[in-house]
Image (cartoon, rainbow, N blue to C red):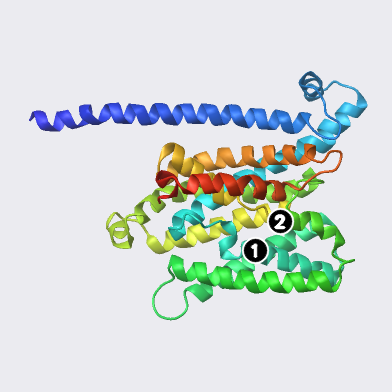
Amino acid sequence: MSAPAAAPAASSPVLRRRRRRAALGLVGLGAALLLAVALSLMIGSNSLPLPVVLEVLRGGGDAEARYVVAELRIPRTVAGLAVGAALGAAGALIQAFTRNPLADPGILGVNAGAAFTVALGVALLGLRDVSALLWLAFLGALVVTVAVYLIGSSGRGAADPIRLTLAGVALGAVFSGVTTGMTLSDPDAFDHMRSWNAGSLLGRGFDVIGPVLPFLVLGVLGALLLAPGLNALALGDDVARAQGARVRGIRLGVIAAVTVLAGAATALAGPIGFVGLMVPHVARWLLGVDQRVVIVISVLLAPVVVLLSDVLGRVLIAPAEIPVGIVTAFVGAPVLIVLARRRRASTL
């Protein structure tokens, strides 16, 4: 009778260590997020000290400080938070779904589909306004993801991660090539798309953020709800079904969530690489492979990476700026190489 009682006692120190480590990680990420937000509000071509920023947030400050903080940097910071959380969650989902630690949200062709429909809007409809291009980008992401699923599930057998990945890479390559050809054929018409194509938070006001924000919130909530199912799928389809998991429903849910998250993020800021690829690696390195923890950490850590990269892009060649998508590529590549060499970070 004493053996059953000994098991909880033996496992409780391990559980306590895990909970303590998770709590410390959340506190550290919260502090890093607050620091990134503060730096994003303070630093730029017209840098402001923290007391001035706080005074503006309380409703005071002079007219110039209010304009810089309220009209320019607060919307830009909110956009960075939203895009980062979306890319982090999408990256964690797609890596768990495909069982591929080198997968990122663009692997399903989401970025390529968004860029293709934006190019069509510019070339055929003469659109120039970011808010109009936003919905075209979102539509392109949805259409391409549906096409990827239909192609990946055609033929014998149900859709599996490998077939979906191959379909996404193939369609993404085709759409990227067509988009590049359209851009080169009329460089004057596509001149204003350069910033969007590089991935930028510049000029993203609440008129652009507002329509996308509900989709991002729903996508993050969906990712959190899918996490237990992804843990079951990690044991194999048969074991997952034996545990009561709906394998097909989980896969459809992941595809839908990745589409909403990566599509909305791409529509808002353009294609930003390495964030969805790198951040889940860091989360697994810090706290293991439980997808519930990985997704939460990714949602908190990715905005830190995006905001700090955006701040870095403002100061490297000031008063000019480097788009955040370029900075994340330069920062993310060496970090990812280091993390990929760690077995714990690379294992799914």
As drawn, the label of residue 141 is 1
Q: Is residue 60 left or right of residue 288?
A: right
Residue 335, given in percent of the width and then of the height, sits at 56, 44
What residue is shown with label 2?
A: 267
User: Image point 82% across, 31% down: which residue?
Assistant: 69
Residue 221 seen in the current view: no
Label 1: element kind: helix
Disc 2 or 1, which lies upstream in sequence?
1
Q: Is residue 44 above or below residue 102?
A: above
Instruction: State the CA–CA distance, disc 2 to disc 1.
Output: 9 Å
Residue 240, given in percent of the width and then of the height, sits at 32, 57
Under mark 2, the amino acid is Ala
Q: Quadrant of residue 190 in the image?
A: bottom right
Q: Are marks 2 and 1 in contact (CB under 8 Å)?
A: yes
Q: Is residue 295 left or right of residue 64?
A: left
Decide: few, some or many residues near mark 2? Use Cα within 10 Å; few <14, some 14-19, many ≥20.
many
Residue 298, given in percent of the width and then of the height, sits at 53, 42
User: Image point 81% across, 44% down: which residue?
Assistant: 321
Direction left: furthest residue? 1
Please identify the quadrant where the N terminus is shown. top left
Pick the residue in front: 196 or 85.
196
Q: Is residue 323 left or right of residue 22?
A: right
Direction right: furthest residue? 63
Decide: few, some or many residues near mark 1? Use Cα within 10 Å; few <14, some 14-19, many ≥20.
many
Under mark 1, the amino acid is Ala
User: Image point 54% across, 47% down: which residue?
Assistant: 336
